[in-house]
Image (cartoon, rainbow, N blue to C red):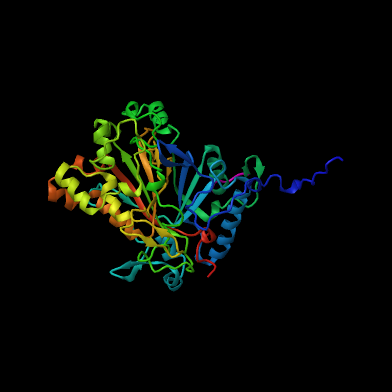
Amino acid sequence: MKAVRAPINWVEVVDYAKRYNVQPPKTQYELPGVTLEDHNGVPVAVPPAWHAVVTAKVAFTPATLRSAQRRLARALAEVESIFPLQPNGLLTQIAYGLSYFEHYLPRDVVGQHMPKAIEDGQPARWAIIDAIRFPKDPENIILEQNDVCFHFKSDYQDNISAVIRALFYPGEKFLNGIPVESVNVADLFRVTSIRRGFLGKNLPKIMATRHRIPGADRIPDGAMLFMGFTSSHVHGLAQGNLPSFETLAGCTDATPSSYFAGGTAMHLSHILVDLERWYRLDPGERLHRMFNPRRREGPEVLSPSQAPDTVTFKDELEQDARSYNVVGHNAQMRHLIRLEKDTTTAYGERLARGTVIFLRQDFDTIENPFEYWSDRPVSSVPRPGVHFVGMAPSAQLFERVRREMDSVELQQRYGLTDENVGFTKFLVTTHRQNFLLPPRAHRSFPLAEL
């Protein structure tokens, strides 16, 4: 008997998202479809290769906020009907600056729903605060005040470029050759910057070499980032919903039923990297400044283990400074972004001491400083840098971590040279801002419906 096949619903053929069984996560920062690799026994995530950040100011009045919310939601839905929600399609995150909450929403509505950081055992300030200048920052660092930040990720750069054109530029709109009707929201935003970059797949060395960046020849083959080490160790990044406001008791007053449950505090910086100076150090010296002076891995190991049993806590950090006159970047911060004791989350998950609660999604760039910047001209001369994107349960936690990265008091206490304090001597931060990254359900102008 001849088999009878079910008829094809040709109406749905161009809905590429239906070809993949992807359940969108509650959070925006969890990335469906990201695979894992084994680096000599160390599990490493393989994030999307190409990235772009678009920052913007809102270009409409508060009176039309609800209409804008519906339009942006429709635009995102249409994008995701064409590009699968995974690295071979497109992953989109949208975060909001303090200026959005302060200028476009009633303060009582924001105050009712904005998570508050726990300080001295009590809810205190909002868990999103303005970014500040830290002790080792340059005097001319720019503390930004953008309303909105879009972060696009894909293994295909053309996917990102097509969506940016469709969302923010005038003209006839196509995505993957398909005409789209609801995607353009250019009238809702005044774009302030477009920042592009890359991650993994030997791209740092390829890009630095082809653009004749000094120090390119010293970048190890296969390195994920300019500075030569792997950045996406599974044990070095918060897993699941750990960066969310509500997941860990004692971070904020948010609960699993809060409006912003599944949201997180997001930090965005642009950082220049002095590759020539960094690679004047031998491989062991770079290892010690990246991790800690007790590490003994050889130069061929780009992914030293970051499992909980390798964590440096405060006492060991002091011992490194006292015994070796060197403290490593990871060691500086690990006692702040790792659990100091076994913990149970608000969702009942049991976590071991040493579990990391901070998530990084940073990527390299050769822009100077950005592809486009509304405030000033940009230079065509390539410079190696990092667009740093990090998520934590509160901006206050990030602030403590970043202050520890400078380690001014520790440095003075033990008379350490600048080059022996992590790697801040090799970095210059040019731009910085804190954002709130809402849960996926509220990614389109949060609180507008209230």
Image coordinates of residue 189 in percent, x first then y, are 50, 54
- Which of the 4 quarters of the picture holds residue 204? top left
Is residue 307 placed above or below 70 in the rendered structure?
above
Image coordinates of residue 447 in percent, x first then y, are 50, 66
User: Of 21 and 143, which appears nearest the observer?
Assistant: 21
**Residue 449 shown left or right of residue 275 in the figure:** right
Residue 169 on the magenta span: yes
Is residue 66 placed above or below 54 in the rendered structure?
below
Residue 32 on the magenta span: no
Image coordinates of residue 430 in percent, x first then y, are 32, 45
Residue shown at 58% from the left, 63% from the top: 67
Residue 416 in sight: no
Chain part drawn in magenta: 168-172
Residue shown at 30% from the left, 32% from the top: 298
Is residue 405 placed above or below 104 in the rendered structure?
above
Task: Considering the whole magenta stretch, tell me its main secondary structure.
Answer: loop
User: Of 16 and 129, which appears nearest the observer?
Assistant: 16
